[in-house]
Image: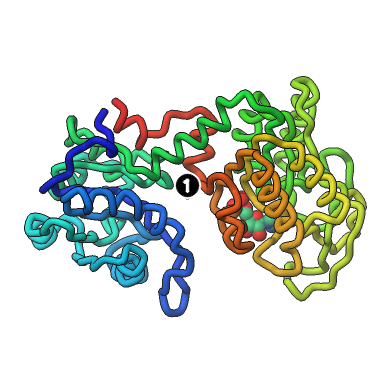
Amino acid sequence: MASIDTYDFANKKVLIRVDFNVPLDKNDLRVTDDTRIKAAKKTIDHILEAGGSVILMTHLGRPKSKDDQQFSIKHIIEHTSKVLGRKVQFVDDCISEKSFEMSANLGKGEILMLENLRFYPEETKGDRVFAEKLAKHGDVYVNDAFGTAHRAHASTAIIADFFPEAKMFGFLIEAEIKSVDKVLNSTEKPLTAIVGGAKVSSKITIIEKLMDKVDYLIVGGGMAFTFVKAMGGKVGSSLVEDDYLETAKSILGKAKEKGVEIYIPVDAIIADKFDNDANRQEVDITKIPDGWMGLDVGTQTRKDCSAILEKSKLILWNGPMGVFEMPNFAGGTRVVAEKIADATANGAFSLIGGGDSVAAINQFNLSDKVSYVSTGGGAMLEYLEGLELPGIAAIRK
Ligand code: AMP
């Protein structure tokens, strides 16, 4: 397998699959969070400084067709250029004759960005012919899109076949793999996982997998209420997945068997509607009145989580503790973020993964106070679950 560290990029056209699937403002289509663009800078700089030219390809959102122009890459060109500190050329189709001409004529140190890959349904279908066309843009293929590494799409996996000798990971994927491996393989203890967010159903596999690894498992966010209800608590109109009550019970049982301390919140900040300005009160999480819903964890839960995090040596955080997007319900998530930062300052290794915990850690300006912030939520979870990611396997094979 080739390595980005040692490969000679001089005079090479380097086709990089990045993950610039960034959020855009609904009204003026400005980039509202450029974490993913910043994360690819190191790879791009390295290749350009080594004398190569760069062709960037990414998807953006979930367009149905080319007509969904709100998903055009043209909206992110200016911002990308600003982040990279370099001019970025743009072509309005990723496999047109014009696009091939532009990549062929690209000079040393220059950057061309292709139009949204998902304007072609062939991308997500993993179409071979489409992948082969994309491959014409470069002499070398670099995959630095960790966020889509769990998808067997044309540009993330299939395309690698057309670069048998010249395919490699970018620095971002390398770093992602290294930090997840550190959590999975380190023998340091205690290892604490905080799994929050909306639903048990989307996190169930990872919870079961983590059960074999972790010492403490903190359950937060909306999914905690399914556990509370499963244990016989009254959760009012909080988010609950009734189909998962048995699953929640079985997780609690397994935790006991395996000696994992599973922590379910004991109190909650409840609201009379799903609104930042709703009426609020703090109650025992098992006694939520009808018509009220839990939107954040309460004071005692914050204290308990802090105590666990203080003694943790490895920390994995996926999913917020509450509806952190609303300032009045962001407190629990903030405390967890701050305590992870404190533990990191005291020598713990902390990995933050999953779109919403990343958004939260950024919102609290703590992203540089933790060990690693993963850019790929779903991909990181699947890698943690021990699955082989197609984007990673395609480079390694
Ligand atoms: P996920 O993508 O599954 O990690 O879920 C993240 C989302 O869960 C965020 O948008 C939060 O606002 C939401 N969330 C967290 N806690 C709650 C809660 N108690 N009730 C409803 N939604 C929640």
Give the percent coordinates (x, y) of residue 14: 19, 47
Give the percent coordinates (x, y) of residue 43: 31, 49
Q: Is residue 379 left or right of residue 4?
A: right
Quarter of the image that includes the N terminus? top left
**Mark 1, residue position:** 376
Quadrant observed for ligand 1 in the rendered image? bottom right
Q: Is residue 245 left or right of residue 155?
A: right
Q: Describe the element under mark 1 as helix, strand or loop.
A: loop
Quarter of the image that includes the C terminus? top left
The amino acid type found where label 1 is placed reads Gly
Q: Return the residue found at the far bottom.
A: 28
Q: Return the residue found at the far top.
A: 257
Q: Does residue 77 sit above or below 13 in this rendering?
A: below
Residue 68 visible in the snapshot: no
Q: Does residue 83 sit above or below 384 in this rendering?
A: below
Give the percent coordinates (x, y) of residue 170: 33, 43
